[in-house]
Amino acid sequence: MSTEQTWFVVAIVLFILEIITPGFVLANLGVAALASALAAYVGASMTIQVIVFGVVCIISYVTLRPLMNTYIYRNRARARTGADAVVGQLGIVTDTIHEAPIGGRVQVGGDNWHALADGGGVIAMASKVDVVRVDSTTLIVREHR
């Protein structure tokens, strides 16, 4: 098997491995292997082929990887975790919410949180509220409409 065929086989194997691994890293190596196969095809020495591999690998990693990650993950919903996951949720006031700093309690999902009314005011017990934001361990809520 000639050198250019070897580089081509390496590129194919790297592209196949990229399919089963995340991150778009092995594909950059595959692009570099294809460039080295082209260099071998035109008669470049092994030293030049390795240099082409390294340079193209770096260039493709710096340019193609961010571009592909943006393209591949553009429709992926950002999963909110922890306290931020309750923002936008509906809650029930379990203890009347008074003016700050006293506040009250709100049940959201299975958790009971300390809460303050957005913009101040009092929200009666058993009222439905929307979580506006989280400030440390305190929910900022407004009455549900």
Image: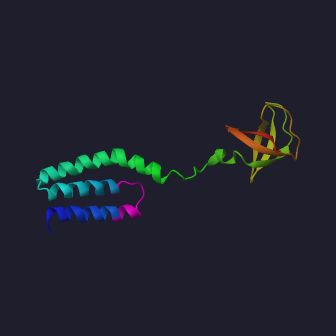
Judge from the rendering whether residue 47 lies leftward or rightward of residue 130; answer left or right.
left
Q: Residue at x 85, y 34 (%)?
A: 98
Identify the image quadrant of the C terminus.
top right
Judge from the rendering whether residue 45 lies leftward or rightward of residue 97; answer left or right.
left
Q: Where is residue 101 shown, x and y percent of the image?
A: 79, 30
Rendered view: 107 above or below 122? below
Q: What is the image's colouring?
A: rainbow
Residue range of the region highlighted in magenta in the rendering? 16-26
Q: Where is residue 29 shown, x and y percent of the image?
A: 29, 55
Q: How many marks?
A: 0
Judge from the rendering whether residue 15 lies leftward or rightward of residue 108; answer left or right.
left
Q: Residue at x 36, y 54 (%)?
A: 25
Rendered view: 108 above or below 121? below
Q: Residue furthest bottom?
A: 1
Q: Where is residue 44 shown, x and y percent of the image?
A: 12, 53
Identify the image quadrant of the N terminus.
bottom left
